[in-house]
Image: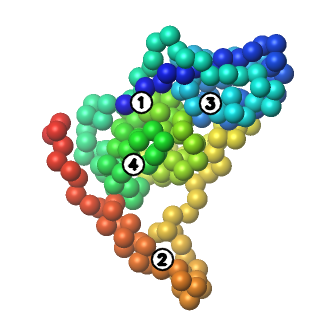
Amino acid sequence: MKVVNLLALVDREKCRGCKTCERVCPVLAIKVVDRKAVVDAEKCRGCAACEQRCPYYAISMVKREEPVVVSVEVSAVDYTKVEELCRRAKLHPEQIICYCTATRAEEVAAAILQGASSPEDISLRTGVRTGCKVECIQPILRLLEVAGIKPEPPKGGWQWYGRTPTVWEIPDEVKKKYARRGFYFDEDIKLLDRVATAPLQERSDS
């Protein structure tokens, strides 16, 4: 569960309609209409990306009158399907994949099973990617991929650029080439496999 206490507020006098805010928002909550940025308060997750990147200092973060709780109830879906999705993506269901919001792989998997089909929709539902917005895009894309979903980056957006290869996908010739330089890919794979396949903790909702 994430509690959102902040909301982006646009100073229309300062706004120049450059669309920087629109391009950096991880949940697509801000759009330029008639050369002025407009915030969808229901969608805004208070991440401050728009405030931090606005070249005209036209956006500020203000306290919401009522906090917004963001979460996906994992117990609302079949947990065997949640676990299957995570394991296929080489992720442990209980593994934290977004350190900023402490979002676990199981919650993202549950969001996908409930119909989320893009990183933006997943972020909106779970709060993932509303911190640094850097590390967690990759596990999200991996989970979407094993679910048979291939999302396209938002048109004109800067939110993400595609999935990077995992250690399991490194070609043998690359492993061999760099083995003498202190890279131990096969050992890394063994360790990560142990993490991904480790037993679940005893669940209170089981």
Q: Are marks 2 and 3 in contact (CB under 8 Å)?
A: no
Q: Are marks 3 and 1 in contact (CB under 8 Å)?
A: no
**Alpha carbon of mark 4 to alpha carbon of mark 3: how far?**
22 Å
The residue carrying mark 1 is: 2
Of residues 6 and 137, the one drawn nearer to the viewer in this rendering: 6
- Who comes first in sequence, dot 2 or dot 3? 3
User: For the residue carrying disc 3, how many other residues have a C-alpha within 10 Å: few (<14), some (14-19), or many (20+)?
Assistant: many
Q: Tell me if residue 173 can be seen.
A: no
- Who comes first in sequence, dot 4 or dot 3? 3
Q: Judge from the rendering whether residue 103 lies leftward or rightward of residue 47; answer left or right.
A: left
The residue carrying mark 2 is: 185
User: For the residue carrying disc 2, how many other residues have a C-alpha within 10 Å: few (<14), some (14-19), or many (20+)?
Assistant: some
Nearer to us of marks 1 and 2 is 1
Q: Judge from the rendering whether residue 91 lies leftward or rightward of residue 151; answer left or right.
A: left
> Where 167 sits versus 162, above or below?
below
- Who comes first in sequence, dot 2 or dot 4? 4
Rendering quarter of residue 87:
bottom left
Q: Secondary structure at mark 4?
A: strand
Residue 86 spot, x, y in % from top left: 36, 51
Residue 201 spot, x, y in % from top left: 21, 50
> Where 104 sits versus 187, above or below?
above
The residue carrying mark 3 is: 48
Rendering quarter of residue 77:
top left
Residue at x-position 46% and y-position 45%: 98
Q: Tell me if residue 83 can be seen.
A: yes
The residue carrying mark 4 is: 96
Q: Secondary structure at mark 1?
A: strand
